[in-house]
């Protein structure tokens, strides 16, 4: 147990460092104004148009770092700052979210897999750990009847959430690669602006990597508690 807390603490510290670095990067590149004078919304609309995507709407959503692509209603949701601002950070985020729209239009396999898991994860992420703890209290650690099965079910559900975290990695990295390729090939940004956009997206991707590692560490710990106990 103590070793687990050390591991989770270390991962938490790395996550905090990455998150804070990401915020600093976006603050820095938010000061790099685009030479073309386009807003994040205009960047997004241009990228969608260049990829022949006509059925996706670009809208503004409240909050900070709330940017996302919604495949259900086909909307690129940009936070108010990204939607309105005209800088390298806004261009990077807007193009990245459009990268997901391009994935959707091209039936990108990893995005389809992630979308398939969403209903399962929406349920499992909130109850898996409680099932495991409840099962262990009922005797699951010793392999006793119902308690073990309850705990095992919790581990399986947590496994789906962990799988979701790892499937998210190629989805996010690919969206960034599509965004950067478009920004560069279409000469949407200067070399300096491109460098800022690239750096910002790299740090954004690292937040998903740390989250996936943390999810795996948690899964392995609880799996050991359930399946590594003595069974009479």
Image: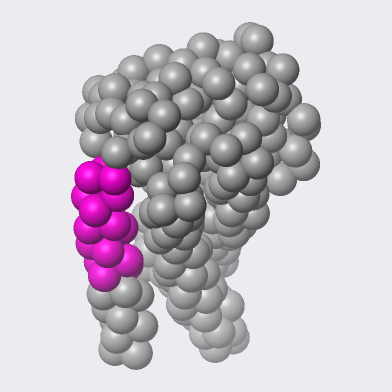
Q: Main secondary structure of the magenta part?
A: helix
Whole-percent x and y of residue 222? 46, 72
Q: Is residue 44 at least partly visible in the picture?
A: yes
Quarter the C terminus occupies? bottom right
Identify the image's colour scheme: rainbow, by chain, secondary structure or one colour.
Answer: one colour
Q: Is residue 95 left or right of residue 31?
A: right
Q: Is residue 37 left or right of residue 209?
A: left
For residue 106, above or below residue 130: above
Q: Residue placed at 34% from the left, 18% from the top? A: 60
Quarter the N terminus occupies? bottom left
Q: Is residue 120 at least partly visible in the picture?
A: no
Using the rendered view, name the quadrant where residue 111 is placed.
Answer: top right
Q: Residue placed at 66% from the left, 22% from the top? A: 50
Whole-percent x and y of residue 58? 46, 16
Using the rendered view, name the quadrant where residue 203 is placed.
Answer: bottom left
Q: Range of the magenta residues?
A: 15-32
For residue 116, above or below residue 40: below
Q: Residue placed at 59% from the left, 44% from the top? A: 184
């Amino acid at each position: 147990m103590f070793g687990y807390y050390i591991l989770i603490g270390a991962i938490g510290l790395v996550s905090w460092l990455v998150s804070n670095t990401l915020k600093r990067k976006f603050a820095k590149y938010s000061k790099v104004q685009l030479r073309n004078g386009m807003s994040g919304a205009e960047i997004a609309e241009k990228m969608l148009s260049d990829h022949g995507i006509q059925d996706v709407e670009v809208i503004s959503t409240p909050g900070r770092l709330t940017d996302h692509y919604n495949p259900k209603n086909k909307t690129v949701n940009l936070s108010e700052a990204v939607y309105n601002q005209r800088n390298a950070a806004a261009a990077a985020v807007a193009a990245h979210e459009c990268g997901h729209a391009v994935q959707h239009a091209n039936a990108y396999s990893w995005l389809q897999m992630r979308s398939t898991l969403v209903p399962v994860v929406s349920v499992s992420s909130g109850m898996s750990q409680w099932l495991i703890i409840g099962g262990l209290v009922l005797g699951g650690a010793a392999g006793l009847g119902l308690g073990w099965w309850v705990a095992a079910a919790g581990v399986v559900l947590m496994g789906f959430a962990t799988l979701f975290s790892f499937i998210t990695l190629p989805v996010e990295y690919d969206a960034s690669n599509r965004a950067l390729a478009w920004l560069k090939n279409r000469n949407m940004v200067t070399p300096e602006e491109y460098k800022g956009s690239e750096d910002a997206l790299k740090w954004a991707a690292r937040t998903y990597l740390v989250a996936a590692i943390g999810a795996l560490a948690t899964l392995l710990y609880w799996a050991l508690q359930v399946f590594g106990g003595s069974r009479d």
